[in-house]
Image (cartoon, grey):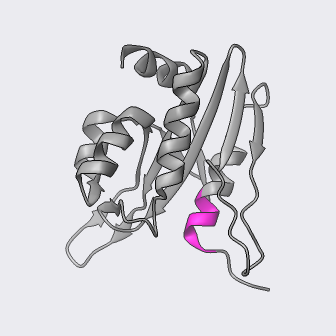
């Protein structure tokens, strides 16, 4: 049995945290090494009247690289285009900065929703999105740690509000 990487655990925990009255569909990653699927995002959520398109990223570092290996240009472009086509589409990235123990302190995890407009600006200008920057421009996604896994309180109404302001 292969051990799940931390990013996949985050995706699974986040998906399992979606309220039951919200439609949630996980787009499968490509499993064929000869062919790469260019998925727009990881999750599609629907809570009337909004369709949410979310790409999830997780890191143990204090920043997430905007390198093409980590965040794909087609994801930025397709999420942005989708949101521009319809008023009721909300697109963006959910960035999870995992906690960790350092020699002198414990760093607590932090998770944020970043609207696609903001991610697009960062993607085309900067090499990374630091946790402090995500804290400034994003919406905090509260969590609680269960015994070994996390449960997130996904603030869909707040996500819609911030998107309407942009």
Q: Return the residue found at the far left.
A: 104
Please name the residue shown 63% across and 65% down the image: 8
Q: Is residue 8 magenta?
A: yes
Please name the residue shown 60% across and 74% down the image: 5
Q: Is residue 112 magenta?
A: no
Q: Is residue 29 above or below residue 34?
A: above
> Looking at the magenta stretch, what is its main secondary structure?
helix
The percent position of residue 35, horizontal first and vertical second, equals: 73, 74
Question: In the image, is 13 to the left or to the right of 145?
Answer: right
Q: Which image quadrant: the N terminus?
A: bottom right
Q: Nearer the viewer, residue 3 or 33?
A: 33
Question: In the image, is 75 to the left or to the right of 105?
Answer: right
Q: Which residues are magenta?
A: 5-10
Q: Is residue 14 above or below residue 153?
A: below
Q: Is residue 159 above or below residue 118?
A: above
The image quarter in which residue 36 lies? bottom right
Please name the residue shown 70% across and 33% down the image: 45
The percent position of residue 144, horizontal first and vertical second, equals: 53, 46
Whether residue 166 appears in this view of the structure is: yes
């Amino acid at each position: 049995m292969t051990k799940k990487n931390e990013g996949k655990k985050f995706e699974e925990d986040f998906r399992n945290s979606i309220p039951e009255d919200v439609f949630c569909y996980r787009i499968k990653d490509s499993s064929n090494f000869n062919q790469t699927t260019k998925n727009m995002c990881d999750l599609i959520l629907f809570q009337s009247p909004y369709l949410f398109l979310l790409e999830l990223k997780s890191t143990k570092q204090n920043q997430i690289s905007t390198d093409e290996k980590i965040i794909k240009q087609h994801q930025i472009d397709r999420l942005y285009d989708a949101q521009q086509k319809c008023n009721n589409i909300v697109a963006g990235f959910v960035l999870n900065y995992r906690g960790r123990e350092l020699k002198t302190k414990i760093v607590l995890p932090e998770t944020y929703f970043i609207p696609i407009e903001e991610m697009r600006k960062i993607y085309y200008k900067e090499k990374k999105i630091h946790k402090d920057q995500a804290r400034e421009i994003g919406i905090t996604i509260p969590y609680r740690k269960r015994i070994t896994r996390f449960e997130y309180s996904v603030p869909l109404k707040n996500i819609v509000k911030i998107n309407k302001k942009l």
